Amino acid sequence: MKKLYFNRLIRDKILDKLISKGLKYKIKKLNKKEFLQELKAKIPEEAEGVVNAKNKKELIEELVDLRLVIEELKKQHKITDKEFKSAIKENWLKKGGFKKRIYLDWTSDDGYQTNEKKK
């Protein structure tokens, strides 16, 4: 039997699909710490789906997937909509939005540490 390895958190109804197709599988129930870790690991997976979306329909589907992971993380950490909206407003006031469509090519080095991975 050929196996496909996923090694990731799946949504609840995916298991139902595997069962209905008669597929063999191996799963495990995550504890809370593992669940939170795997939820965070879903963010880049879902964000990659957004990046690779080929049309509006796919983009909407991928944005929804990403949003559902974010909403579950908010729920697990007891972050209210009010707290989240307040943080969005604070972030926007501090950094602004994307209306001007500015792309930064480079700056001189002032010791700034980005939270993004190097390419």
Image: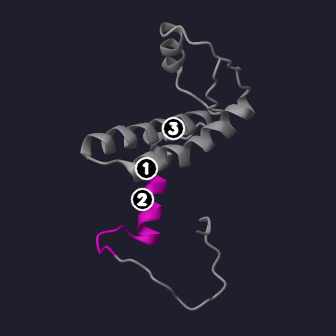
What residue type is disc 1 on? Lys
Q: Residue at x 74, y 34 (%)?
A: 33
Per the image, label 2 sits on a secondary structure element best described as: helix
User: Mark 3 or 2, which is nearer the eye?
Assistant: 3
User: On the image, which quarter does residue 31 sit in?
Assistant: top right
Q: Residues within 10 Å of mark 1 (few under 14, many from 20)?
A: few
Magenta span of residues = 86-101
> Between 4 and 82, which is closer to the camera in this rendering?
4
Q: Is residue 89 magenta?
A: yes
Image disc number at residue 85: 1
66 is higher (above) or lower (below) than 91: above
Mark closer to the observer (3, 1): 3
- Residue 65 horizontal/vertical position (percent): 43, 37
Q: Residues within 10 Å of mark 2 (few under 14, many from 20)?
A: few
Q: Which residue is rendered at x = 58% and y = 68% of the image?
A: 119
Contact (Cβ within 8 Å) of mark 1 with mark 2: yes
Task: Specify the amino acid type for callout 2.
Answer: Lys
For residue 89, the mark is 2
Is 68 magenta? The answer is no
The crowd level at tag 3 (other Cα within 10 Å; few <14, some 14-19, many 20+) is some
Query: Marks 3 and 1, how far apart in space?
Result: 17 Å
Residue 18 position within the rendered picture, expressed as x and y whole percent measured from the top left: 52, 15
Q: Are the residues tagged 3 and 1 within 8 Å (C-beta)?
A: no
For marks 1 and 2, give the CA distance: 6 Å
What numbered label is drawn on residue 69?
3
Say if 31 sits above or below 101 in the image: above
